[in-house]
Structure formats: C-alpha cells, structure tokens
Image (tube, rainbow, N blue to C red):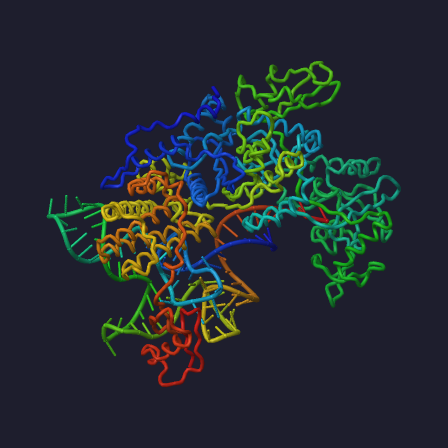
Amino acid sequence: MARSPVSVIKIYVTILREETGPIMAVRYEPRRVEAKWQQLWQETRLFEVEADPARPKYYVLEMFPYPSGRIHMGHVRNYTIGDVVARYKMMRGFNVLHPMGWDAFGLPAENAALARRLHPAAWTYDNIAVMRRQLMALGYSYDWRRELATCDPEYYRWEQLVFIEMFRRGLAYKKMAPVNWCPACQTVLANEQVEGGACWRCDSEVVLKELEQWFFKITAYADELLADLDRLPHWPERVLTMQRNWIGRSEGAEIRFPLAGGGDPITVFTTRADTLWGATFMSLAPEHPLALDLAAGTPQEGEVRRFVEHWRAQNRSRGALEEITKEGVFTGRNCVNPVTGWEMPVYVANFVLMEYGAGAVMAVPAHDQRDFEFAQKYGLPVKVVVNPPGETLEAAGLTAAWEEDGVLADSGDFSGLASAPARQAIARHLAEQGLGGPAVQFRLRDWGISRQRYWGAPIPIIYCDKCGLAPVPERDLPVVLPLNVEIDAIGASPLGKLESFLHVPCPTCGRPGRREADTMDTFVESSWYFLRYACPDYREGVLDRGPVNYWAPVDQYIGGIEHAVLHLLYARFFTKVLRDLGYITIDEPFTRLLTQGMVLKEGAKMAKSKGNVVDPDEMIEAFGSDTTRLFLLFAAPPERDLDWNDQGVMGAHRFLHRVWTLARTLLPRVKGAAAYAGPGTDLPPALGELRHKVHRTIQKVTDDIEARFHFNTAIAAVMELVNACYQALESVPDDELAGRVWREALETMLKLLHPMVPHLAEELWQALGHDASLQRTAWPAPDPAALVESTITVVLQVNGRVRGEMAAPASATDEQITAWAVEQPAVQKWLAGKTPKRVVLARRKLVNIVV
RNA sequence: GCCUGGGUGGCGGAACGGGUAGACGCAAGGGACUUAAAAUCCCUCGGGGUUCGCCCCGUGCCGGUUCGAGUCCGGCCCCAGGCACCA
C-alpha cells in the first residue's frame, strides 16, 4: 500500500551509534567513518535550510530520478557533481538549497505491476525506499525534509489546479489531431518523445493515429521560448542549438490561391515567395479538408478517395515516412496563381504534411527538389524564375532544382531583384493586394499531454451530455488516482473501465457526468517540481510566493543531455505559464545548466544485458562512498563520458589512504600549534616552499571549481599538494614553527577536499581538534604574499627551439633577463658566434633568441 | 544532407592571454622491505638515435600566419550526438 513519502523519509538508515569522537585508527576505515558522519549530519540537521532574505541564496539541483529500482552509476555521478557544488557554495557563505525527490509516475510501474503482480504504487514506494537508502549512504547534502514524490496526491493536486487555470485561459485544450501512437506502450506520445520515428522509451515504431487529445498550447510561447535562449549564456551551446532547431522558426509569406471556378481559396505558407512566379501546380496533404471536396463530382473523385484513404494519418508510420516515394493524384480542379493568373492543377501528394503550415504547398519545380521530382514524374511544367548570379538557367536542361538564392527573372516588376529583398517586397505586395502577406511558421507543435495509461495524474475534467466538458471544481481537488484497479494486460486504460471512478455528477447541472479517463504525460510533473521544493508542504496553493521568490530560479541545474529538448523545453514553457498565472516572477527556470556525460564500462553503456553493470552499493561496501565519489570526479571532467575503471577506483582509494596516513603522521607535530598566519618572511626556505604550494593549491582548486567545475584538475592539484607534503616530511625540521605551517597545510587540504570527500575530511578535521563541522568553515583564500615567487624559471629558446632554462631572481628587470639569457652556455652553443637578430621575452617565462 | 561537439602516450586525462606537450592518476618494467605474498616506498615510462652531454621526430591529414602553433586561419579525413520530405 502506498505510504506518504514524507513520513518514510523520517526513518533514517539504521546506523549503530558506535562513536562520535575521532576515529584515529592506523588504517583508514571508510565504513566506520562514513556511517558516523552521516548520522551526525542528520542529527545536527546540518543541511536543513530556510529562506533567509538577509543571506545570498544558491539553488543547486540535479534532475530527480525515476524510481526504477536501484541507483545506477549515472545517478551517482550526477548527484556527486551536484553535491560538490552544493557543499562548495555552502562554504562560500551561500544559503544553499539542495533538494531531492522522485519522478514517480510512469509506465514502468505498470509494466512491473503486470510482470510481478504488484500494485504500481507499492512497487514505486518500495523502489523509493531502496533508492533513498542508497543516496543516504553516499552522504549527499540534501535537505531531506523537502523530499517529494510526484505520485503523491499532495503534489499532483496542485498540478491539476494549474491544468484548470490553463484550461480557463485556453492554454489547455482538446482537439482531434493526428498523434503519435506507440503500439507497445498503448499510448500517445508528444512529438518530443518520438526519436527517429521510434518511441523514446521502448524504441517501438510509432504510428500516426487520429485521436481526440488534450494539448498544452506551447506554441503560444514559441517566440519567447526561442528569444529567451539568448538570455541563457551559461547553457551548453549544443543544448541551445537543439532547442532552436526544435522550435524551428521560419519567416516567409502566406499566400492565397483562388480556385478556378469559385470556392474558398487555398492558403499556403512559403519561405520562398521570391519563386511565386515559378509556381506551376499545387500540392495538398492527404488530410487536407479540401482534398476530397475538390474532387467531388469530377472524374478524379474515386482515385482521389482511394489515395486519401491510403495515405491518411492512420496508415502512415513516422518510421516509414523516410522511405516512401513521392506520389500524388490530380484532384480534377485547378487553382489560379494570383500574380501570373495561370491555372495550376491541384494535386494531393503523400509528402505534404497537414501539421505544418497550411497543409498545402505551392509547387515550384524549378527551385524545389521535391517539386522537381514530382513534376518530372507527372509531366508538369517547370518554369525558371531565379537564376544563379551571372547565369541563365533553361527549364528544359535542368536535371535538378536550383534551390539557392539568386536573381529573379520573369517575375513581373520584381525581375532583376536578388532573392532576399524580393521575398520581402513580394510579401508586402501580396498584403497590399489582399492576397496574403508576411507570415511566421514554427516547427514546434502543441504539446500533447493525454496518456491512455493508469499510473499518472488524472486530468481534472468532467464530461456531461448536456453541458459539454467542465473542469472539476477546485474544492473537489485532488482528483485522486484510485488504487483499487485491475491491471490485467496492457490495453485500454484501467481508469476507463473503472465505473466507480468514472461516475461523477456534472458540476454545472448536477446530472450524471463522466470523468476524463486519460492521465497526464509524466513530463508535466517534472516541469515544475523544482519550484515546489521551495515549499513542499504548502497546503494553501500551488506555490508559496515568499520562499519561491527567494529560491527561484535554480542557479545550477545538472543532468543528462538526453533531456536537451524534452524536459528542458517543457520546464521552460511551464515556468513562463506559471509566471503569467501570477505564481512566480522569473522568466527562465535554470540559470546555468551542466549536462554531464554518461558512465560507461569498457566503452559501452552499462546494461544488464551486457553484464557490465557496476553496482554503487558494492563500491560503497568495498571502498566507501568517498572513494566512489572521488573516482567519478577524478576520471574525467563532468561533461565528458566516463569509462569506469576498477584500477582507477583503487587509485582513488590509495590516495585517500595517503591523506589519512599523512594526517596521522602529522598529528603529533600539529598538536597544540595554531595554524600559521604570519607574513611568511620568517620561514626557512623548506617551509616557505611548502606554504607557497599550499596557497597555490588553494588558488588552483578554487579556480577549477568556480570557473569550470573541473573537479578532475582540482583533485590533481590536491594530489600534488599531498605529494609535496610527503617530500617535505623528509626535509622540514620538527619544531614549533613547522608545526604551525603543517597545521595550515593540513587544514587547508581538508577544506579543499571537503566538497568531494566530505566524510574523510570531517573525520580528520575533528581529529585536528575542531568541534564544529567543516561544513560550517569558510572556504580558504590564498594569501597573496605566499603566492609571490622569489625566483622565476625562464625557458631558453634559440630560433623557437627549447635549448635549456635558467633561474633568475623575481626582482630582475626584463632587460637583465634577456641579457643573461643570451649569455647562457646552452644558448651560446647554438648561436655559433652569430649576433642575435631579435630577442623576444614572453610573459617573463620564456626568452626566444632569433639568429 | 544540415547543425553541434570532439580527434593529444599502452589507458583516463592536463596544458583555459599562442610561450618547456604529456600535470595528476592508471597500467607496465626495474629496485627496496618481507621467509613469501599483499600493502607500502623509490626509480623508469611518447617514438628514434646517443659519445649519456644531449640530438632528431611527434598533438587526425595538407597548407598558411608567427620569433614561436595542440592552441589562430584555409582546405580535407574520421568519430560521437541531434535534426531530417517543415514547403
């Protein structure tokens, strides 16, 4: 039975409370250390945050998981990256919101229910319990009080309210339309959910079906969704490009072609108004309402009917669309080219899409390859009206259409104009003549959200034979998804057969009505969950404006590239709708976006079928969460794919052992010493160098995290520091001054490591004598004095080739450096007595002597 | 076909104002410690040559700019991802 997720989270993983004092064992024992700190963090409520207008906020969010059963390495990588950012920003003084929840509706729950005779709710909540335990064992800095599951009626009731508000504004509407149907999932898919003609989830070939469906009017926001991409400079370029392509704005003209013999004109959209004088026939989509009307009563009627029947939406699959050959049939009627007055035969053609533009295309065979092929096949006239600059094309000699821009010919007053200005001039001319005018088209279609499935949020609509359809009254929300259903086989939606659910009085007239049995696309839930985290328990409405306005937008969003158009486009749309409904004031939900790469094994995606799955639990058991985290951060920069490597994990583990051993070795030396905070001038060379390295490391790690999230190089820098410390152990005397420098080095090292390996860092921090959590400690700042070099190394080149290097005091002038460089034996050897023609000094790092 | 990324040692990856290519780590080889193994520590580790000082070649390919190019420009090749009858 479904339990409320909120009550379940309070039950923490059982950890024996062994100890709270420092565990300064000889050997690093990650399991003891990690269990201890996970419990302490929870008891001290370290990661619980509230809106606080006095403090700067930072909202870091990772895409929430679908509770499929167990966490996989891809999740661990995603959430580890987010955790490093969250902990880093906390140390930088930000009030950090870092929540986690569950994208809990979806078809796999129904499939599992069928396969294992479990209720989808039970399956889902059981999975959540397992995955929550796994996440907790990784030690992430989530404010677990904010956990939400989208299948909770307390979540989706607000979504239903938003639906109703959208319905009232015409942003949610129902229409009959050709839609994508996945025969395997037995449900409709949105355009974004069809990938190369196949279902995004199960890869089955998608067919087109004519159905009455609910849509969200995302096209009403097409212009803004496109324009605002320019306001997202911190999104990856390829995601922006993919969204631009998806929205697919094109500017052109709408043109009306009167019918010969009377009747309503045929409207077309074209981006090539400059080719209007070359339009010689007309092509209609098979679903075009005029197709059958025109043919009625002509000798062509029967043939057109057969053609339309054959090619209408039901019989076309998206996969097959690519292979079909272009064919068509004459309707028996002509239309008139409004500028030339020529009669153009009207065809029905199988390659014309009803969903784009007006479902009709003016055919210009000389300048469009599709039309050219069609004209060749049916012997239709070809008329050249655009010539390449300095050339004149002959229609008879064409072997392919000339699709580029050029210079207009045989185009009335517009002849001689270049294509681009001609398009504008012709559009204006059409508007003046009442024949059409400039127009904009989008490739983006409205978002079909009806799903003929059970495990989703019910659409809050009631049908009445007398009153039509009406939204469920707000006081009756939520429309709770009934749990007493029979899920027998994938087929008709279980809700559609559940009489107790369907029967409801009409809210308008009180007579028997019927509920909508479709549920919402699960992408609706994920379109606004990031806002609900700001007020997960708010019971008065969709969003609590106070905390939401404080926390929103998400400052850093992290997730997979696979949502480049799907989730990320829907969430942007929903943000704008919620803004227009008055809930929020932001225009865009995610200020920065990081798309992390996949986790591979032996170069291939991890999959049960390939037997190359690495289980996070096993890694935590064997090496600990800190080692697992460290490896994932170190093996590759976050946006790149990462190949899992067991030896590499051993290397990460070895490093943590080295840190542990170093700290343990130094403990007696730093006991009672305060961290060095002097000017640096009082230090002997060995200590000065150590301190120099410490501060250079601060600078490097800060820069790598702050500017680029390149944790791999940040970790490499700390590794260098650790190596330098081991070296210094040999050369540095064991005195009071050294103790202070050692403490500064060690404490700095732990602060820098903390976001990445928090348990180990906390443990050693405590062992150094600190009571407060390292999490409450400020991120270190480099001391400018410690960064100054007393000597510089200058690389010597002769004619651009490296011939040696020399040391010089940092105080030397540029002139001195170049003079000394020329005198160096390593240089003289290559000068062979010749006088340098030119000596170049680059950034006081390199001298190039040209002879 | 169009649009984005990306090609660097045996491997993962560094080099982010054009300025010592290969940081850091993994693997491999040699050595120390040990009865032995593991663990740990030290050395070597792009290719070729070497009088052991060094020298030549080398960042997908060809060309260019520059004192100097992995990095900039032009032209290709290959790989990955996205879109694909959108009028």
Is residue A308 shown to the viewer in this render? yes
Res. A172 image quadrant: top right
- Write down the quadrant of residue A601 in the picture: top left
Residue in front for this viewpoint, A316 or B10? B10
In the rendered image, residue A650, in percent from the top left (x then y), is placed at: 30, 45
What residue lies at 64% left-to-right and 24% top-to-bottom?
A: A460
Which residue is at 56% across, 19% downward? A482
Nearer-the-camera pick, A353 or A174: A174
How many marks on residues? 0
Q: Quadrant of residue A568?
A: top right
**Percent x, y of residue A311:** 69, 38
Image spot of residue A558 (x, y percent): 50, 43
User: Is A5 placed left or right of A246 in the picture?
Assistant: left
- Height in image: A160 above or below A531? above
Query: In the rendered image, is residue A605 in sight?
Result: no
Residue A846: x and y in percent read 40, 71
Residue found 37% across the figure and 76% down from its top? A821
Quarter holding the C terminus of chain A is: bottom left
Residue lying furthest right: A261
**Residue A735, placed above or below residue A185:** below
Q: In the picture shown, does residue A242 fall above or below A472? A: below
A632 lies left or right of A244: left
Residue located at (32% from left, 35% from top): A621
Task: Locate residue A303 relative to residue A531 in the image: left or right.
Answer: right
